[in-house]
Amino acid sequence: MRKTFIVGNWKCNKNTQEAQDFARLLRQNCRSIPEGVMVGVCPTHLSLEAVKQEMQGSDIQVGAQNAYWEASGAFTGQVSMKMLKDSDFNFTLVGHSEQRQFFGDTDEAVNKKVQAALELDLGVIVCIGESLEERESGTTEKVLETQLSEGLKDVKLSSAEKFVIAYEPVWAIGTGKTATPEMAQEAHRFVRQTCAKLLGEEIAAELIIQYGGSAKPANARELLDQEDIDGLLVGGASLDVESFTAIINA
Ligand code: PGA
């Protein structure tokens, strides 16, 4: 039975004080996380440590929004996977569409990041998804297949415990447009089938596949009711503690 993993991606929002205050409230709200549900938040690198301190002793996971594959060196502006691991963070996002769009992440870079995270036994959420143009031209499956086969090239997993895929149609991110539950389910089923080919049937069956793109309290339940949707990666609606809590309780 797959768990449900709800993650808040705060993007470039909240200074350290705001992140810390939010973390404290979320922790209070999540004193009893529903059975079978896992919760995580991704603050900016600047606030990671403060949020981790607030979450100490709770079940709420703390992850980064991105990290670099080399352990250390002359890579100005980067924080490495190794540093995240050394500081006991739970996971990192990789290949978020905004990283791809604004900061040039390619499938090859995503692959290096995935490999580095797995080598360190750091959890990783690999984000994939098609643009509006790609959806409208009927190439959604082809795009997802390429992102998966190149992003997961040579990846070997003995378990899916620390490995998550987030399907986030780019046209639904931050736009208020959500994929219908049926549309999302169709894409999720395709992602799982593709992962079965790449990673094996057993891993694919265990794999948590999150949906992301304007997820909110009003649509969380019907998205999560879909057979292949095992969680949500929430941007905008995770910035408000009440709405994020409502999503967790959904
Ligand atoms: P959104 O963002 O919920 O604001 O659409 C989701 C994401 O980018 O992870």
Image (spheres, helix red, strand yellow):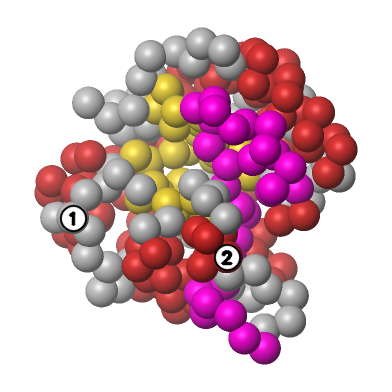
Q: Which residue is located at x 34 percent, y 39 percent?
A: 208
Q: Which residue is located at x 73 percent, y 81 percent?
A: 76
- Residue 177 belongs to magenta span: no
Number of other residues with Cα within 10 Å of mark 2, as a class: few under 14, some 14 to 19, many 20 or more: some
Quickly name the residue at label 1: 158
Measured as percent of width and height from the top left, residue 247 is found at 58, 19
* Left or right: 217 as drawn, with respect to 224: right
Q: Nearer the viewer, residue 167 or 61?
A: 61
Placement of 232 over or under 192, stated as above or below:
above
Measured as percent of width and height from the top left, residue 155 is found at 27, 68
Measured as percent of width and height from the top left, residue 55 is found at 62, 31
Q: Which residue is located at x 22 percent, y 26 percent?
A: 1
Whole-number angstrom distance, CA of label 2 to CA of label 1: 24 Å
Q: Which mark is residue 83?
A: 2
Q: Which residue is located at x 53 percent, y 37 percent?
A: 61
Q: Is mark 1 within 8 Å of ligand 1?
A: no
Q: Which residues are magenta?
A: 47-74
